[in-house]
Structures are given as structure tokens and as C-alpha cells.
Image (cartoon, helix red, strand yellow):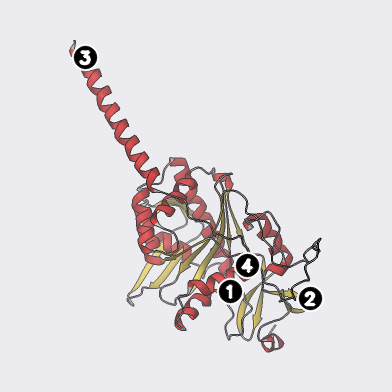
Amino acid sequence: MGIKKKFIYIVLGIVAALAIMLAGGLIAYLSWEKPPELPASPQPALIVEETPEPEPTPTPEPMPEGTAFENSRRDGIYTVLLVGLDQMSGSTDTILVGRFDTVRHEVNLVSIPRDTIINVDTEVRKINSVYAGSINWGGNGIDSLMTQIDWLTGFVPDCYAVLDLYTFIDVIDELGGVDFDVPEEMEYMYQDVMGDKGYLYLAPGMQHLDGAHAMALCRYRIGYITGDYGRIDVQHAFLKACADQFIRLGNIPHARAVAEMLGENLNTNLTTANIAWFMRQLMKCKSEDIHFYTMPSEGRILQGYSYAVPRLWEWIEMVNFSLNPFDTELGMWNMNLVYIDGAGYSGTQGYLDGDWYFQTEED
């Protein structure tokens, strides 16, 4: 056998061995990851006034609107609550509710503004104060926040994940950074949980962001005319850039390492294997099938605090279009939220908790 022919056989043997090793690794990865379990009983947890049990009849009467009933889920649909936690204040300044369609390979994410008003009788009625408030009163934070999301959307998300700033930075660094077109010059002063102060600067234009600069980009809002809404738009653009980058690459760098990092550091009901499964499902999506929305609302001042008050009918339409995992439409009878009703305010359940609060509006 000639030297050239022998060399070709050696190369082919090495390639074959590598292929077998890669295939074995892929099989091991696929056998390790798994989807999360969905709730055993159908949702949503409808909010309804108690009514007397009807007398049994041979032919049951149709259930009135708003009566609890069993909803069937659409195949392959998962709903998720994603939260960004400010470790200094304990507030949840980034709140995203999502629907992941693993059959049609489509992702919808809806931002809930940090100042969204909630129907509770407390001095501050902002949704971003719920998590910290619960912990301050001996709770775990996430249960109270999930309840408020249920009241806003009409259903309890299947999965939740609370991400702190440091884990966010570590994940972006592990991914190798993200290319992003920074919309404007940003100067950012920050203070970490140890009390140490720092300074970050971002020049406008396309650049490769590491974790710290990505964090600064996503938290910055002081320079936007629209305040928190401007920040939400940039967060959407950054997350879309992340997804586009990894979809173009055809993989998520260090996927298992990232999944394990998230599994160890998130406050979540997902396992590391669940996170890995979602990451692979994301890679099956096309860039144009990943959509971002923001809860429609209007700015109002109540007792000196600024609030985002939902525009009810637009919000219900958005919930059903982008988030609802069920075959049946959700409506105001599934929700417990405050909305603008003419010149005043109303609650979808027919009451405003602590009604006195709404009688001293400062416009």
C-alpha cells in the first residue's frame, strides 16, 4: 500500500472515530436532557365568586361565563415566568411571561412593566415590589409573584426562573459574549451586593458585549425619554440578538456548562436537564418566530407613585394571542387586575382592594 493511500486511510479512520465519539456524546446529552412535567390538572385557576351548587338535572344547564371548568391545553405548549432580580433592592425590575410552542417552534415573550399596578391594599402597589415584600414578611418571594402573574394573565405559568445580576453576567461570559448594536451612549454607575461601586461605559454602535457590559445595557434607563419602556425595548432587542446569534451558529456554546450554571444558580422549578431541553428546543426555532411584546398600559400617578395601569381590552387580546396555552379564550373573569374605566378605575373582579387609595388621585 502506498504512503499516500495509507495516509488517506489514517485520516478517514480518525474522522470516523471522532464521528463515533461525537455521536456518543450527542446520544448521552439527549438521554440526559428532558422536558419539564406539566401540571397534572388543567389550568387556569379561575377567579370566580362563589355560587351555590346547582341542583343535579338530567340535562345539565350550560355553565355561566366565568365558572371554573376544565380547559384543554394545546399540544407542546409550555408557559414560563422569567424574572431579573436586583440583588441590592430585592426588586424584580425585569419580568417576562412567555409561551414556548415546542411543536410549532415559536416563542412569545411579554414584558410586564416594573411599575404595573396590582390589586392589593398596600402603600406601594407595584408588581416589582411583590417578590421582596414577600421575603420581608417571611415568604419565599416566588409564590406571591406567581399569584400576581396569575391575576394579571389568568393562568399560573408552568415554569419560573429568577435570575440575579451576577448569574446573568457569568452566563453571557460563558456564552462568549454577544454582538449588539448599542442604540446610544450609556454611562452606568452601579453598586454591588458587597457595597462596592463601579462604573461602566458603552459607546453607541455595533460591538461585542461581555457579561458586565451586557448587564449595564439591560439595566440602563435613565437616558431614555420613555424611561422603563425604553429599557424594555432595548432588553427585547438584546435578547433577540442573543437568539439570532445562536440560531445562526446552529448551537449554543458550552450548552451543558451553561445549563448547569443556570440550574445551580437560579431560583427555579426547572432541573438542569429541563433547562438543557429548553435550550435545544430554542435552537429549532427560526429567528422570525421569536417575538417580543410589552403589556399595553398607561402611566398614572397615585398618592405620589407612578404606575403603569393596564389597558384592559388590549391586554386581554395580547394574552390570548401571545400567551394563552389553552384551547379556550381567557377573559376578564379569569383576572384580578386594576384598569382604567373612563375617568376612574375599576377591578375585573368588581372591587378595588383598599378603595380609599383611588379616591386621592394626583393628576
- Residue 46, picture quadrant: bottom right
The answer to whether the residues at label 3 and label 4 have Cβ atoms under 8 Å apart is: no
Amino acid found under the numbered disc labelled 4? Ala
| Precedes in sequence: disc 3 or disc 1 | 3
Residue shown at the point (53%, 44%) measured from the top left: 285
Q: Which mark is residue 115?
A: 1
Q: Which residue occupies 29% across, 27% down? A: 15
User: How far apart in space, not on screen, are marks 3 and 1 (Cα)?
Assistant: 71 Å
In-image side of 224 versus 189 (left or right): right
**N-terminal label among 2 and 1:** 1
- What residue is shown with label 3? 4
Please tell me whether mark 2 sits on a helix, a strand or a loop: loop
| Front-lying residue, 42 or 276 | 42
Q: Name the kind of residue labelled 2 in the image.
A: Gly
Question: In the visual, does 321 lie left or right of 140?
Answer: right
Q: Which mark sits nearer the N-terminus, 1 or 4?
A: 4
Residue receiving disc 2: 342
Amino acid at dot 1: Asp
Q: Is residue 252 above or below residue 349?
A: above
Q: Which residue is mark 4?
A: 45
Q: Quadrant of residue 310?
A: bottom right
The quadrant the N terminus occupies is: top left
Residue 38 in view of the camera: yes
Mark 1, secondary structure of its residue: loop
Tag shown at residue 51:
none
The image shows residue 69 at horizontal and vertical percentages of 69, 63
Instruction: State the separation of the CA atoms marked 2 and 4.
Output: 29 Å
Q: What's the CA distance linking mark 3 and mark 4?
A: 71 Å
**Residue sitting at 35 percent across and 48 percent down?**
254
- Label 3: state its secondary structure: helix
Judging from the image, what secondary structure is the residue with disc 4 in?
loop
